[in-house]
Amino acid sequence: MNNHFAIAVDSGKHTTKSVFSINGNLHKYKFRTLVQEVQDLGVELTPTNQIVELDGKTFLIGDMNSEAQSNYDISKHSIEHLLCIYLAITKYLTQIDSKNIGIPNIRLAVNVPLNIYKNSVLKAKYEQFIQNQQKTISLRVNRKAFIFRIDKIILLPEGTGPIYQRINEFKLKRSLIIDIGD
């Protein structure tokens, strides 16, 4: 049985979006990129929120968190983005019922700011950070256990608009891109 799966994740400052294909059908998933470390939350979760346990710590992800929890740091080399990327992967693994396939190997495409994309040292550090140095990643989402390995990662530049799609059209022009994000 195949245990290699592809997923694309855009963990933005406001919303994390992911897309994957199962049997030719495209599936999209999104949630607020609001993360807070919690202990004994004591309230019932709404459907747009998740409790994620990783490395002995517990985090609430979703819109139950205050906007004050937003991380506007320019770098995506943060626990917030790491957790949101991993959460998006677990949503995919839930859809494919991964419990019967061993340890899933994920082929991940993720966007990064241009300062990371254009710097080979920052790029390598970010890849290792997201891949967990190619070791298995185990976490719990709403008390359900998940384990996977990020086999390959492709970093893509964010905010490039049509420039990379129609490179010949823009090659000799000066262009300005305004990336509003989501």
Image (cartoon, helix red, strand yellow):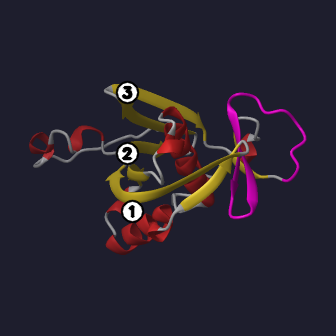
**First in residue order: circle 3 vs circle 2:** 2
Dot 1 falls on a residue whose secondary structure is: helix
**Which region is colored magenta?**
39-60
Q: Which residue is mark 2?
A: 5
Q: Are marks 3 and 2 in contact (CB under 8 Å)?
A: no
Residue 130 visible in the displayed image: yes
Is residue 35 within the magenta segment?
A: no
Dot 3 falls on a residue whose secondary structure is: strand
**First in residue order: circle 3 vs circle 1:** 3
Q: Which residue is mark 3?
A: 26
Mark 3 and mark 1: span between their CA atoms? 30 Å
Residue at image location 9% in from the left, 44% down from the top? 168
Tell me where residue 176 appears, x and y as whole percent: 29, 44
Kind of residue at disc 1: Asn
Q: Nearer the viewer, residue 160 or 36?
A: 36
Mark 1 and mark 2: span between their CA atoms? 28 Å
**First in residue order: circle 1 vs circle 2:** 2
Residue at image location 75% in from the left, 60% down from the top? 57
Residue 16 visible in the displayed image: no
Q: Which residue is mark 1?
A: 115
Tell me where residue 109 appears, x and y as whole percent: 36, 49
Kind of residue at disc 3: Leu
Crowding near pointer 2: few (<14 within 10 Å), some, many (20+)? some
Residue at image location 56% in from the left, 54% down from the top? 147
Tell me where residue 170 appears, x and y as whole percent: 15, 43
Task: Work out whether 109 lies above or below 94.
Answer: below
Q: Nearer the viewer, residue 126 or 12?
A: 126
- Give the number of the mark in front: 1 or 2: 2
Q: Are marks 3 and 1 in contact (CB under 8 Å)?
A: no
Kind of residue at disc 2: Phe
